[in-house]
Amino acid sequence: MLIETSRFGSIEVDDSRIMRFRDGMPGFPGEQRFALLQTNNDPAFFWLQSVDRPELAFVVCDPLTFVPDFQATIRREELESIDADAVEACQVFVIVNKVDGALTANLLGPLVIGVNSLLGRQLVLSEKKYSTRHRLMSARSTRPVARTA
């Protein structure tokens, strides 16, 4: 399938890799089909690109890359809604934003995707230890990469 994107032009994606969010995404209830794109050499970040709206895409990452102890509680009915039997059959991503020169992640609204079904949904967590703007890193580092010993 050829997907039109506003950032990368036309990209070929195998139909078997298209993810569906039956309820859409918050703020975009009609947008159900997405593709996960890796467009650069940084393996930590991906684009979750709408198949049907070229201008709609979210930067996402695996939260464990930056928050090793991150744990989302997924209820049985949430697993069933994405045709997954267990959390081990899921991949979790979080949406990344740039806020005041820093990259932040919405840890309270992780995306969970059934790895076999490719069905996904956004969870709404109430964990007090997480936030919608968890700082991942500064967009521009101010310290030198190396220093003299």
Image (cartoon, grey):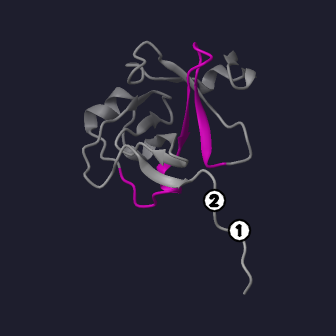
**Are circles 2 and 1 on residues that touch, CB within 8 Å?**
yes
Q: Which residue is mark 1?
A: 145
Amino acid type at image mark 1 = Val
Q: Residue at x 63, y 53 (%)?
A: 140
Query: Observer-nearest residue: 76 or 56?
Result: 56
Number of numbered labels in the structure image: 2
> Looking at the picture, which amino acid does disc 2 mark?
Ser
Q: Is residue 130 magenta?
A: no
Q: Identify the residue shown where x is 32% and y is 30%.
A: 80
- Give me the residue at 34% from left, 48% from top: 131
Neighbor class of circle 2 (other Cα within 10 Å; few <14, some 14-19, many 20+) is: few
Q: Position of residue 55 (x, y in %)?
A: 60, 19
Q: Is residue 50 magenta?
A: yes
Viewport quadrant of the N terminus: top right
| Percent position of residue 61, x then y | 54, 44
Residue 1 visible here: no
Residue receiving disc 2: 141
Check the image and report above or below for 3 versus 81: above
Magenta segment boundaries in residue numbering: 43-71
Q: Does residue 23 show up?
A: yes
Graded by Cα atoms within 10 Å as few (under 14), some (14 to 19) or many (20 or more), the crowding at tag 1 reads few
